Image (spheres, rainbow, N blue to C red):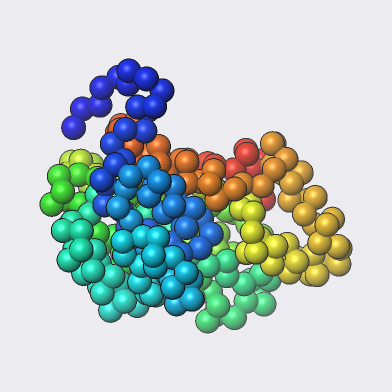
Amino acid sequence: MTAKAPSSANEYLAGLSGQRVAVTAGAGGIGFAIAETLSNLGARIAVCDISADAVKSVAGQFEIAETADVCVDADVDRFFDSVADKFGGLDALINNAGIAGPTGGVDEIDPADWRACLEVGLTGQFLCARRAVPMLKQAGGGSIVAMSSAAGRFGYAFRTPYSAAKFGVIGFAKSLAKELGPHGIRVNAILPGIIEGPRIEKVISDRAEQVGVSNEAMTDRYLQNISLRRMTSPYDVASMVAFLLSDAGINVSGQSLGVDGNVETL
């Protein structure tokens, strides 16, 4: 497919209407913002999420909403079977699922917590991609967006499982971009910064307790490392996803794209 120059600003995100998109961890947080944004732009949305309550809350908003753990092969198979049955194929996969993992020194981290963080954040992306890719090939091309993090660029002291998973996501995405490019499938990683919401509030609280300062003081420390001095909204990330899936992003692949207000260090 060859993109043409838009005749108006409204056409820059052309090509989203009717796209069949699967979003993991799509019933809350960044995943929901992505699913909602793409749905508003005319895409057909399938979401899965590990939280049954969250899935129930969005069940009427998206065509497919299922409870699934991306670490469990059978759950992933069931979700993508539903996508194939309902949509007849797939045009894009948003590999969004991940967990914060433990906060602590490497000698303090429970091996089970390490494994859980890598399983959700990295192995889950593999399990979903292996089911999505045949459908994307059948569709004649498409897009995969992998959710990494600024921690996948800088490293993150006392959050080693999370950072390791996010570095792995970038390697996986870049490798898939090479592998799948000849099939017209674009693969990119997004590296959000500090995302507003309960997850970062807990991370900040845990770190503040660890070093003996207030939550407010620790929040200020985090913001001092961001050039724009603001956290990232889930909808900031959703806007980048919309660009990548649209005709405007047709020649963008193999990239690691920061959406973080320019995080300078972690």
At 73% from the left and 69% from the top, the residue drawn is 206
Q: Is residue 107 above or below residue 263?
A: below
Q: Quadrant of residue 52?
A: bottom left
Q: Residue 225, percent across and down?
A: 72, 44
Q: Residue 164, percent across and down?
A: 51, 61
At 47% from the left and 69% from the top, the residue drawn is 57
At 80% from the left and 70% from the top, the residue drawn is 209
Q: Residue 50, percent across and down?
A: 44, 74
Q: Answer whether residue 147 is visible to the viewer in this image.
A: no
Count of number-bearing discs:
0
Q: In the picture provided, is 92 more to the left or to the right than 202?
A: left
Q: Quadrant of residue 133?
A: bottom left
At 44% from the left and 52% from the top, the residue drawn is 36
Q: Residue furthest front?
A: 60
Q: Quadrant of residue 140?
A: top left
Q: Nearer the viewer, residue 54 or 122?
A: 54
Give the quarter of the figure containing the N terminus: top left
Q: In the picture provided, is 248 more to the left or to the right than 111?
A: left
Q: Answer whether residue 244 is visible to the viewer in this image.
A: yes
Q: Nearer the viewer, residue 32 or 120?
A: 32
Q: In the picture provided, is 263 more to the left or to the right than 86?
A: right
Q: Nearer the viewer, residue 235 or 120?
A: 235
Q: Is residue 194 above or below residue 115?
A: above
Q: Is residue 226 above or below residue 6?
A: below
